[in-house]
Amino acid sequence: MLSRPPTKITLTQADISLAEDRKDARERAAAAQQAAIYGTGEPSSSQETTEDISDAGHDDSPAVSAQTAAARARKAREARIMAIQQTSEFGSVNDLSHALPIPSQPDGALISGPQLEDLYGSDDMESPVHTFNHEKRAGNHGSGTPYWVSQIKRQGKAVYGVNASYVVWRNVKDYGAKGDGVTDDTWALGNATSDGGRCGLGCDSSMTTPAIVYFPAGTYMVSQKINLYYYTAMVGDANNLPVIKGTPEFDAIGLFDANPYLPYGFNWFQNQNNMWRQIRNFVFDLTLVDPNRGVHGIHWQVAQATSLQNIVFNCVVGTPGDGNAQQGVFMDNGSGGHLEDLIFNGGGIGLFAGN
């Protein structure tokens, strides 16, 4: 199969000037940080606003305001993204990386994590670099208006099922879940998921017992993992994302487990045949759980016809170097799957994909 080589971006003088401005901003931020740490200079009495950045001259004082430096970096970053947007064809987004190197601290160590975010002026509502027309979900995770999926009449039956009374649509509140952020809802959620003699351990696969498990808005506390059965859609209120939150004693492979492990490395399902799964419209929260435990928001060992959509993962902030073993999604192996609109906050690793 023939493939076209990536089209290179030609840097204009304006691009180079922006890169120089950004380099200048990095140096100023580093100097300000050094002044704050080592006392090598006095804070500048002049304060520039973001609006003044484009016309401001270059102050050579090593103690120039870090806020000013961050504003300069933000402006250069926005201009760079605009330049890429205006390019009709482009290949690797790293084509400009040589002009915009990663900033470093006074001791030469690379700035990363929150420091890098502060320098670039990133915030929760700002789209990631190289993504366009993208808006992150706000802190309330939705509009709060009624979600149409929960309002429509339920009259369908399992197409291949033999039990006329089998329930496809289940609301977890009908199984006793409270979603009040206090009650342990583990057993209620488990009952809502497993009701009806569904395909689990020893089944391998089945098309006769599908289920849509619906979660209204709320915070559902769980002390043990929720095992997911074959041919299941776990659906939250898209207009007010429900939160699945681990209790402090939670210690399992994932808040939701799509393929539970058995002794000696066996699973409920063969991972390449673990199909017909969906999880959408949730917040998974591990912030109360000890970060040294190897727990995950979702254990997602699945195959084709599967998807994770519109999900926020909140973990304890840290890195593997700090001993933080939390992960948003643990996808140890399997065969495919669709991922869309996932946000990872904190954790040692956001997404581990082994397939």
Image (cartoon, rainbow, N blue to C red):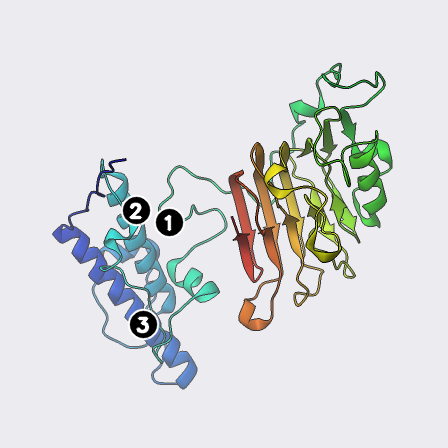
Rounded to the nearest whole Å, what is the CA distance between mark 3 and mark 1? 26 Å
Circle 3: element type: loop
The answer to which of 327 and 35 lies nearer the viewer is 327
Q: Which amino acid does label 1 sit on?
A: Val
Say which label, 1 or 2, has the lower sequence index.
Answer: 2
Q: Which residue lies furthest to the left in this view?
A: 13
Q: Mark 1 points at which residue?
A: 129
Say which label, 3 or 1, has the lower sequence index.
Answer: 3
Question: What residue is shown at x 73% (from left), y 32% (from top)?
Answer: 213
Q: Which mark is residue 81?
A: 2
Rounded to the nearest whole Å, what is the CA distance between mark 1 and mark 2? 7 Å
Q: 261 left or right of 80? A: right
Q: Where is residue 101 in the image (x, y as percent from the top left)?
A: 28, 63
Q: How crowded is mark 3: few (under 14 residues within 10 Å), some or many (20 or more)?
A: many
Q: Name the residue under label 3.
A: 64
Q: 186 left or right of 310? A: right
